[in-house]
Image (cartoon, rainbow, N blue to C red):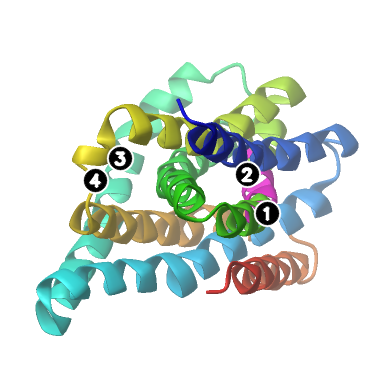
Amino acid sequence: MTNDVVLALILTLFAGLAAGIGGLLVLFTKITNKKFLSFSLGLSAGVMIFVSLADIFPEARESLTGVFGDKFGYMAVIIGYFSGIIFIGLLDKITEQKLTVKTKDTKDPELMRIGIFTAIALAIHNFPDGVATFMSTLQEPSIGFAIAVAVFIHNIPEGIAVAIPIYYATDNKYRSFLWALFSGLVEPVGALLTYLVLMRFLNTTVLGVVLAVVAGMMVFISISELLPTAKKYDEGDISIYGFVFGMLIMAISLLLLGE
């Protein structure tokens, strides 16, 4: 393993750990603070919708139109996007009762399901991020470092999005932190798998389809789960403020990424 590969893996680990830092926020909040819950869920929805429509969807379109041309490439993105919505919608319906049964010991199984779905969607999203950071570092370490720093900032609110609903569902700070950490550590895992196995299989088409599907999944979770639950605990318009603030955070992080 060369020094460049080691550096690339270290940078992806650095970026991935940021989700755990976001998860650590639960150490500083009280479970009785429903205003914070409403604000955080709104923030989570803002984070996921903005990054899906302003970053992931355009990136998928750029990838697939580059392969199939403007018309058929865009058609492939649309199909992937709505396939993601249909998939996560069906998964939500299929697992709703089962997940509720498995989490009878939790205070709010609905919030637990939201947290787990958010973690899964963000973990899938973070896999290409890990690949991008890894490959960029191999090509030019200075660019890889800049991307890793921007992704690090980008991942902190994503960790919050995972940890907060799980914490309020279970009153277990350790469990919520681990779920947040899991969603971020997919990045270095993605980098390592790329180095060991996937470099021969990954191509622009596969990554473009995955990104389109993930964009659909994240938008569905935000509209179907995060925003309605945020309004459920709302006082005034605090969830809307959280939503706007979440979009602002992601806009700044994407600006740092040079998007």
Q: Residues within 10 Å of mark 1 (few under 14, many from 20)?
A: many
Instruction: Classify residue 63 as left or right of residue 145.
Output: left
Between discs 3 and 1, the one toward the N terminus: 3
Q: Gap in Å between the C-alphas at discs 4 and 1?
A: 24 Å
Residue at which label 4 appears:
202
Query: Hey, what amino acid is under mark 2?
Result: Ala
Residue at which label 1 appears:
149
Q: Gap in Å between the C-alphas at discs 3 and 2?
A: 29 Å
Q: Residue furthest bottom?
A: 70
Question: Where does residue 29 sit, x and y in percent of width and height?
Answer: 87, 39
Is mark 2 in CB contact (under 8 Å) with mark 1? yes
Q: Magenta span has 157? A: yes
- Determine the secondary structure under disc 4: loop
The one nearer the camera, 62 or 83, is 62
Residue at which label 2 appears:
15
**Dominant secondary structure, magenta:** helix
Query: Hey, what amino acid is under mark 3?
Result: Leu
- Tell me what residue is drawn at x 16 percent, y 83 percent: 70
Q: Gap in Å between the C-alphas at discs 3 and 1?
A: 34 Å
